[in-house]
Image: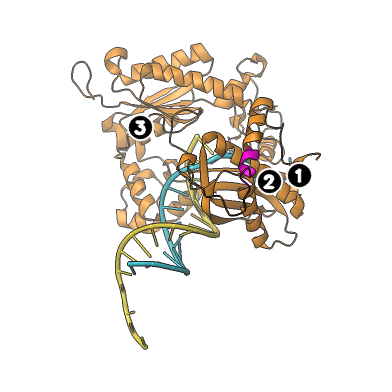
Chain colours: A orange, B cyan, C yellow
Amino acid sequence: MTTSAGAPVATPILHVDMDAFYASVATRDRPELHDVPVIVGGGYRGVILSANYHARAFGVRSGMPSTRARRLCPHAVSVPADHDLFSTVSAAVVETFRRVTPQVEVVSLDEAFLDVRGSTRRLGGPATIAERLRATIHDEQGITCSVGVAASVSVAKLASRRAKPDGVVVVPPEAITSFLHPLDVGELYGVGEKTQAMLHRLGLVTVGDVAHTPLRTLQRAVGAGLGSQLHELAWGTDRREITPGRVSVFGMGGDPDKSMGAQETFGRDIDDREVVLREVLKLTAKVASRMRVAGVAGRTVSLTVRFADFTTITRARTMGESTDVTQEIYRTAVALYDALGLQRARLRLVGVRVEGLVPRTTVHRQLLLGEREHGWSDADRAVDRATRRFGGAAVQPASLLGR
DNA sequence: TCTGGGGTCCTAGGACCC
DNA sequence: TCTGGGGTCCTAGGACCC
């Protein structure tokens, strides 16, 4: 943590956040869309992925239901999401980061933390590095980003938000509390809509209010864990180090997944068991295939059901042994569904998730008495091979065909 | 045409074992 | 027939993040 002169780097953490990433990438090569409101993704019954700043001026935000976005900004141009392109551009940007330092923690396709304390001798101070990064990304990718620079991960993240769009904000150590304390509590990591409302009800509106609330009081209000987290964040004292490759966004590095799942919102609400279970099978096949590709198996199957009124329930069952076999997961999911005893309730969404994943090599499965040696597992592997060769739609369970 | 899809973590209660 | 505490596993729901 020293420069060539031996002085410690006071603000070694950079948080780089691409500006309206999906919208910027989607319109990058379409100059006719640069000066009009643009919305990315979000079809029927969906939410939008992103919106450019022209659309945001009308109140449109990422994650907003497309119906609402459309109402706020009826003349916006809608463009489809191109996930392959997003991934390609994102990977290129991460490569740019890695030319600065190997200490890169990728948070998502459009966001990363960099610890540059080992790079200042070669590249200059953190603020200089931030500006050079922004220039490079703009030159190479044709999109802009904003950078927050601070001593800690949490402050850097808040600083990048303040820097948007297309800017840099440095928060030196002596300015941390004057930067943090005027912010609304909702800005803090871990404070969403519900917690924000609860804190406001208690009269805790700003980060400064939280900072000056006794820890025990805070913990009583929001729980022990979140309480101490908020207290730390409010003083900017969190010491979390960045962990390179923490999130596996590009199928490389990162922590192993603890669960894998898939869910689907129906085009219209469904009350027919046959139709629901057909979807459950499709989702199960997708999840199990991903598990086999990743070389993992899991013991707990959980089924999610969302009703027409948006209430959502989950039911889980833990099996005796871990599996990655489509039919075994499906059988469990069907048992969970039938145990719900739904009488033609209208369902909006159904989801399947497998939890407690472990490497398949650690699973020593005993063949059940009477189970054929070449059972479902071999059938699955044949499906996976065909899927690799011919694409996802090539091989499907028979009950999914001809629909 | 209100409200996606992929995840993680926390809390709380009950069962069960020692 | 009175009485505890701790630890682990499992389930359900909720909140949050990108």
In front: A388, or A266? Answer: A388
Quadrant of image for the C terminus of chain A:
top right
The reply to whether dot 2 and dot 1 touch (C-beta < 8 Å) is yes
Marked residue chain, label 3:
A
- Magenta region, residue range: A372-380
Q: Residue furthest left?
A: A6
Residue at 62% from the left image edge and 36% from the top image edge: A381
Identify whether A136 is placed above or below A297. above
Residue at 51% from the left image edge and 36% from the top image edge: A295
Residue A399: numbered disc? 1
The residue pinned by badge 2 equals A281
At which x and y percent is residue A165? 49, 25
Secondary structure found at label 2: helix
Secondary structure found at label 1: helix
The reply to whether dot 2 and dot 3 touch (C-beta < 8 Å) is no
The reply to whether dot 3 and dot 1 touch (C-beta < 8 Å) is no
In front: A192, or A55? Answer: A192
Sequence-wise, the earlier of marks 3 and 1 is: 3
Q: Nearer the viewer, mark 3 or mark 1?
A: 1
Which amino acid, mark 2?
Answer: Leu
At which x and y percent is residue B14? 47, 69
Task: Say few, some or many: other residues with alpha carbon within 10 Å of mark 1 (under 14 / 14 to 19 / 20 or more).
Answer: few
Residue A304: numbered disc? none
Identify whether A204 is placed above or below A141. below
CA gap, disc 3 and disc 1: 47 Å
Residue A242: numbered disc? 3
**Whether labels 2 and 3 share one chain:** yes
Identify whether A271 is placed above or below A254. below
Asked whether the viewer can see residue A226, the reply is yes
